[in-house]
Amino acid sequence: MSIMGLWMPILAASVLAWIMSALVWMVFGWHKNDYAKTGNEEAARAALRGLSPGLYTIPHARDQKEMAQPELQKKMQEGPVAMLAVMPSGLPKMGVMMGSSFIYNVLVSVVCAYMVSRTLTADASYLQVFRVAGTTAFAAYGMAYIQESIWFGRPYSVTAKNLLDALLYAVVSAGAFGWLA
């Protein structure tokens, strides 16, 4: 089986995963409570105004030596401790974000095609292709969320929902590969 011969399942899996993502985020609604409002949103907005887009930590330590300083440890104990992503001001550029999401789906599908082409022969059954493509897609779409919970404070309940999303994307991707490979 050649990776170049898998262009049709790559495209179909990318489109189906993109559609499933739209359903997850716009119809199913299970992510609507992933983010909470701050207690005083206007004060928080005023305090953060002027920050350039990027990732920030509060309190911030550049290295382990600074982390060991009593002043910083006191700030950590007092809280809040936060990791903050600041995005550009203005309305989200949905076209760019949706296009980027589709390109990401194509990348995941190419990785799936690579795994299918390297592990299976041209006469592989639907279920064999489904298994390899689905496992690969699930790993690609979902596994990084776990370390977000371990290291960066993402609630495990949000990670569980993201893993459910990844499973849905993997199933439609695997179905496309099983059908068209």
Image: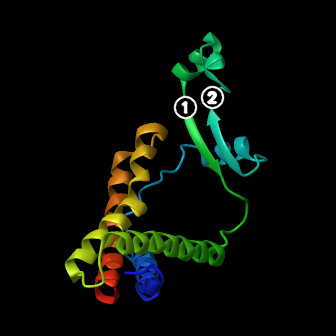
> Which residue is denoted by mark 1 in the rendering?
81
**Residue in the foreground of this view, choosing between 48 and 87:** 87
**Going 29% across and 88% down the picture, which residue do you hit?**
179
Where residue 125 sits: x, y (%)? 21, 82
Inspect the image, locate mark 2, and give the three-letter code of the amino acid beneath it: Pro
User: Looking at the image, can residue 147 be seen?
Assistant: yes
Where residue 120 sits: x, y (%)? 30, 74
Quarter of the picture holding the N terminus: bottom left
> Which residue is denoted by mark 2 in the rendering?
59
User: Looking at the image, can residue 154 be seen?
Assistant: no
- Which residue in the rendered view is the most extreme toward the top? 70
Q: Residue 101 appears in which quarter of the rendering?
A: bottom right
Q: Marks 2/1: CA distance?
A: 6 Å
Dot 1: what SS? loop
Inspect the image, locate mark 1, and give the three-letter code of the amino acid beneath it: Val
**Going 31% across and 76% down the picture, which residue do you hit?**
174
